Amino acid sequence: MTDTRSTDAPMAETRSTDARSTDGLRVDRVSFTRGRRLIIDDVDCTVPVGRVGALLGPNGAGKSTLLHLIAGIERAHAGTARMGDRDLAALRRRDRARVVALAEQEVQDAPSLRVSEVVALGRTPYLGAFAGPSDLDRAVVRRCLEDAGLVELADREYASLSGGERQRVNIARALAQEPELLLLDEPTNHLDVRAQLTMLRLLRELAHGGLTVLAALHDLSLAAGYADHVIVLSNGRVAAAGDPRAVLMPELIRTVWGVEAEVLEHPASGRPLIAYSDVAGERMPQRHAR
Amino acid sequence: MSTTRVGRGLGRESGRGAGELRLETQPLEIVRLETRSPRPGAPGLGTTGSPPPRPARSGIRTGAWAVGLTVLLAASVIVAVTIGPAGLSPSDVWASVLAHLGIGEPTLSPLRDGIVWELRMPRVLSAAAVGAGLALCGAVMQALTRNPLADPYLLGLSSGASVGAVIVIVLGVGLLLPFAAFAGALVALVATLALANAAGAMTPTRTVLAGLAVSAVFGAITSLVIFWSATGDSYREILNWLLGSLAGADWTSVAIAGGAVVLIGIPLLASAKTLDAFAFGDTAAAALGVHVGRSRALLLTGTALLTGALVAVSGAIGFVGLILPHAVRFLVGSRHRALLPLSALAGALFLVWADTGARTLFDPRELPVGILTALIGGPVFALLMLRNRRLT
């Protein structure tokens, strides 16, 4: 485990100004087994307040599970996840939902709700049994629609939206929980390039406003371009963590993903740009003649 | 769920529903269309195929529907009591009600007063309570199982409740009737969900098929028990339990069905926000702070309890729980704070008239009301199925 844990990413343009918790997300020795399989194995990681953390790793590395454990959807068998000085697992469900929000991957069968109604679901942890949404709840929903750039779509049916729009609605719903920590499970999945960049810009802006963000991502260059801090999972363990430029090295990419890659410097931003060349340790597959 | 969305699109602004259907069947298209600027106010946004803004589903709108349906229901109860032989007028009914509440002087002859107060009023009120309860159950089950085809009848709860009810009646312990019906409903619910789950992922189709199997078995048991024990008109008995009937409803029926609707309806209404949270599935609900397993178990037990009480009164009446929540979603959307109370009102209204039809259409013979509800509900069910092609 080459954890170059850095709480001071040099590239960070998104310094937090108004930190609500002193030191952000701190996952400490978390383990989780499903059946006999160890899915998450003694994971330590941190994301400082007001930063975007990218959770990287091949399929099955345990990214989604780790997010679920932090969000309290499943309970870790060992270890703690803290936000500031609060142990998230020790909070009541409702209280936890006011601290951590999770934007999932897109659901298959979309419910018949309008965009504003979907975002209002984020107020669930603040609602009483019989009372309807208060003026405050409505104001928060309106603000989250604005923050996610959804004002024009507020009255549209959720099911009629494009993939990128739906993802933004999911994020707005999570924001309506007024969380301190926003977790996202592959928010750029199935999006075209513009929608992906838009999504990551949005995450950066949110972090700039003081939110701590941890997003499971697949695209290494995208993660390197936008995240302040990357955490690389491999078989349920942290393979490396820290500043993307320090972490995303060819050796690591070969070990974790089994891919030969060169790490270049982005001509404009100077951030790492990963150029894949081949599957590691195997001969180039025979090309079929067309 | 998306059925109602498409339906609503067609209702409010014609021309959009068709476009939505096309997008739905080609999910790839959705991704390709994502080329719009995300920032508010950016050029192009709101012009490319985006529909004109619709009026907000405000609380006022829901309130208006609630008041309208309540008035309509009260009027329907009075009018329904007048329908049938004896030539009663609404003012006769009103006078009888006031007299029995101790407010006015009795003006009707004892015979006509008996028809109003002892025969028709309890029957109409039972129909209202059963209809309200079934629609509530349907709405709650549809949310919890994320299955637009869920309802107490299709998932076998009603048949299970019938078995419980028939057994205690045969054994002569009528006092246990509601409890036995509840136990039967719960057994059937657990059987259906376990069967659907064992067969793989609990898709709506699989759940309905499991419900069909459970219904068939429990329906057969009900028939067997009646056939084996009954001395007289067992066929009619069997029909009444399997298809549902409110013939013979008395004030005890009103107390059982009405009491159950109030006692269980209130906690169900209090769970509206929890039911909303299930819209995006279990993980999303958990992330919103909902105790998913406990909430689902409690709420489904509540629906089994309510179904038990209703079936004890009326037998297994189908399709009320299925179609009324969909009709109400069409009007006010899917938020349960509006959906649950309005479904209850609409269900009451629907069954009052269905039962009135059942007892008068073929007068003097009486039709089990379930035949009428199935006659209306079957085609609606087919329509739901055709519009939800992804349900398989």
Image (spheres, helix red, strand yellow):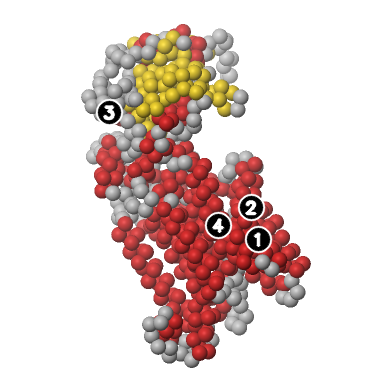
Q: Is residue A201 left or right of residue A76?
A: left
Q: What residue is shown with label 4? A: B305
Query: Nearer the N terminus, badge 2 or badge 1?
Result: 1
Instruction: Give how far apart the Cα atoms at labels 3 and 4 are.
Output: 46 Å
Residue B175 appears anywhere in the view: yes
Q: Secondary structure at mark 4?
A: helix
Instruction: Give how far apart the Cα atoms at labels 3 and 1 are.
Output: 57 Å
Chain identifier of the residue bearing label 3 in the image: A
Chain identifier of the residue bearing label 2 in the image: B
Q: Secondary structure at mark 1?
A: helix
Q: What residue is shown with label 1? A: B164
Q: Which residue occupies the foreground of this view, A130 or B144? A: A130
Instruction: Give how far apart the Cα atoms at labels 1 and 4 are.
Output: 12 Å
Instruction: Give how far apart the Cα atoms at labels 4 and 2 are.
Output: 11 Å
Residue B191: horizontal and vertical position, in percent? 64, 49
Q: Amino acid at mark 1?
A: Gly
Q: Amino acid at mark 3?
A: Arg
Hey, which quadrant is residue B200 in on the image?
A: top right
Hey, which quadrant is residue B240 in on the image?
A: bottom right
Q: In the rendered view, tell whether residue B153 sits above or below residue B97.
A: above
Q: Which mark is residue B187?
A: 2
> Is disc 2 in contact with disc 1, using a CB cutoff of under 8 Å?
yes
Query: Nearer the N terminus, badge 4 or badge 2?
Result: 2
Q: Residue at x 52, y 13 (%)?
A: A258
